[in-house]
Each structure stands twice: as C-alpha cells, then as structure tokens.
C-alpha cells in the first residue's frame, strides 16, 4: 500500500482547533476508509507514553527556554519513531494536534528563542520530513483570549498575554508564508458551518 499522509492542526490557544479536529477526523475517516486505510489521531507534546510524561512537565513546570525547546523536540523524536513513521509506512494517515510549527511559534515567536537553534533541532529530529498538509486556525489574539477565558484552568502557555500570542501568531503566519504548498490558513473568526465547508473542500483535494 502507498505511504499514508501526515496532516497537522495548528493555531494559537483559543483559535478553535480542538472544536474542528473531531469533525475533521470523522470526515477524513469516511474519505479514506474505502481504500482500507485508517486515521491515527495523535497530539504534541505527547503521542507516546514518554511524550505524555514530557507533556505533563512542559505544561506545568517552569524551566529554562532552551530546555523547553529541547524537550519539545525530544518528545517529537519519540513520536516520529514510535507512532508517526510506522503508521505512514503501513499506509495509514496521521492527524496530529500540533507539530513543529508550534515550537517555532511558541518557543520561537512567543518566547523569543533564536530561529537558527530551532532550525538546527528541526533538521536533527526530522531531516527534511514535514507534514503533507498543515491547517492553521488563524484568529486575532483578543478573540482567542475571550474564547480561552471560558475554558478550564489555564496551563503555562494558555495563561500567556495577548502580546505573547500576537508574536506566536505572527510566527505561524511566517512559517505559512515560507511553505505555502503545505499550509491552509483557516480564518477562525468565521462561523463553524463556514469553516466546515472549507474543511470539506480541503478533504476532497486529498
Ligand atoms: P494544546 O494543543 O492547546 O492542547 P489543549 O487543547 O489540551 O490545551 O496544548 C498544548 C500547549 O503546548 C499549547 O499551549 C501550545 C504548547 N506547545 C508549545 O509551546 N510548543 C510545541 O512545540 C507544542 C507542540 C505545543
């Protein structure tokens, strides 16, 4: 069977990524089921037993910025080796809630880690590997912050300022501009039905 495809969901906290992920997954499953393939749903940081332990630390424990970036990529290495690569090799499709664009956006854009360090880690951990498609849920930071305020107890990232999310968003958009062939920018200020229509169109091109 031909290799599967790797699709990632990205966006600042409160952009609505989680709402659309479950719907997208169901539609994607219907889209590829006839070919005998399945969808592997996963997330970052996380996706493996070790990765989930690292997630717990990353989301709740204070640490040096470089340590934070290294742990994100360490979890990613494990995720690629244990889950993503084997699934794609057997012909399944992988849908991940965040991947390396999040590290560039949060640790790079948001927290200010120099990009060349992140690029070096990306080369080390991924070689040239990138998602086949990245859905970037894009929304203004003040809208995202309103949406977040109704959510549960915020973690270390969710409690950041609008200024932090303005920088994070800008880095996401820069990454999208750098690799337009794999990014689809979804205007997340639109209604849910409107966004679902766009997602449907995207799935039909896969
Ligand atoms: P998120 O994906 O928003 O999950 P949930 O919906 O359960 O809150 O949470 C993951 C957080 O981790 C998010 O705030 C972004 C952050 N993050 C980084 O800072 N760098 C990364 O490389 C990744 C993958 C996530």
Image (cartoon, helix red, strand yellow):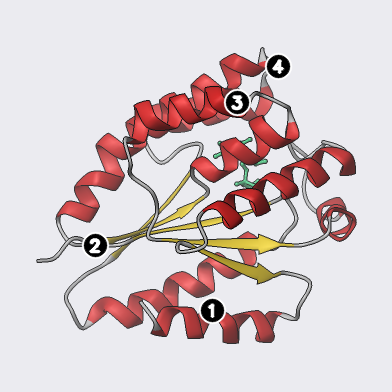
Q: In the image, residue 1 lies at what x, y percent?
A: 9, 66
Beta carbon of the mark 3 residue lies under 8 A of ligand 1: yes
Q: Residue 52 versus residue 104: which sits nearer the camera?
A: 104
Q: Say whether disc 2 or disc 1 marks the residue closer to the N-terminus.
A: 2
Using the numbered discs, state the Cα–Cα distance from disc 4 to disc 3 in whole angstroms: 8 Å
Q: Say whether disc 1 or disc 3 marks the residue closer to the N-terminus.
A: 3
**Residue 49 visible in the current orientation:** no
Residue 111 in the image: above or below residue 85: above
Q: Is residue 60 left or right of residue 117?
A: right
> Mark 3 sits on what residue?
58
- Nearer the observer: mark 2 or 3; the answer is 2
> Mark 2 sits on what residue?
4
Using the numbered discs, state the Cα–Cα distance from disc 1 to disc 3 in whole angstroms: 31 Å
Which image quadrant: the C terminus?
bottom left
Q: Quadrant of residue 184?
A: bottom right
Residue at image location 89% in from the left, 57% down from the top = 146
Q: Secondary structure at mark 1?
A: helix
Q: Quadrant of residue 19?
A: bottom right
Labels 2 & 3 near each other (Cβ < 8 A): no
**Residue 196 visible in the current orientation:** yes
Q: In the image, residue 132 lies at what x, y percent?
A: 37, 60
Using the numbered discs, state the Cα–Cα distance from disc 2 to disc 3 in whole angstroms: 30 Å
- Nearer the observer: mark 4 or 2; the answer is 2
> Mark 4 sits on what residue?
62
Q: Say whether disc 2 or disc 3 marks the residue closer to the N-terminus.
A: 2
Using the numbered discs, state the Cα–Cα distance from disc 1 to disc 4 in whole angstroms: 37 Å
Using the numbered discs, state the Cα–Cα distance from disc 4 to disc 2 in whole angstroms: 37 Å
Q: Secondary structure at mark 4?
A: loop
Category of crowding for the residue at label 3, using alpha-carbon neighbours closer than 10 angstroms: few (below 14), some (14–19), many (at least 20): many
């Amino acid at each position: 069977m031909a290799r599967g495809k790797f699709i990632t969901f990205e966006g600042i906290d409160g952009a609505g990524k989680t709402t659309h992920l479950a719907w997208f997954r169901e539609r994607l499953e219907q889209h590829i089921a006839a070919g005998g393939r399945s969808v592997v749903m996963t997330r970052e940081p996380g996706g493996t037993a070790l990765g989930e332990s690292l997630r717990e630390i990353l989301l709740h424990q204070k640490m040096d910025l470089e340590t934070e970036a290294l742990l994100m990529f360490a979890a990613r290495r494990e995720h690629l080796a244990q889950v993503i690569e084997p699934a794609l090799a057997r012909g399944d499709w992988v849908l991940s809630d965040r991947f390396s664009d999040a590290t560039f956006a949060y640790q790079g854009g948001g927290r200010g880690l120099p990009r060349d360090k992140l690029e070096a880690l990306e080369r080390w951990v991924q070689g040239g590997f990138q998602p086949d498609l990245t859905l970037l849920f894009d929304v203004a930071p003040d809208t995202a912050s309103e949406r977040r305020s109704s959510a549960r107890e915020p973690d270390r990232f969710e409690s950041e300022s609008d200024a932090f999310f303005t920088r994070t968003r800008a880095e996401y958009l820069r990454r999208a501009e750098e690799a337009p062939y794999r990014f689809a920018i979804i205007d997340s200020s639109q209604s849910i039905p409107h966004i679902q229509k766009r997602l449907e169109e995207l799935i039909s091109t896969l």
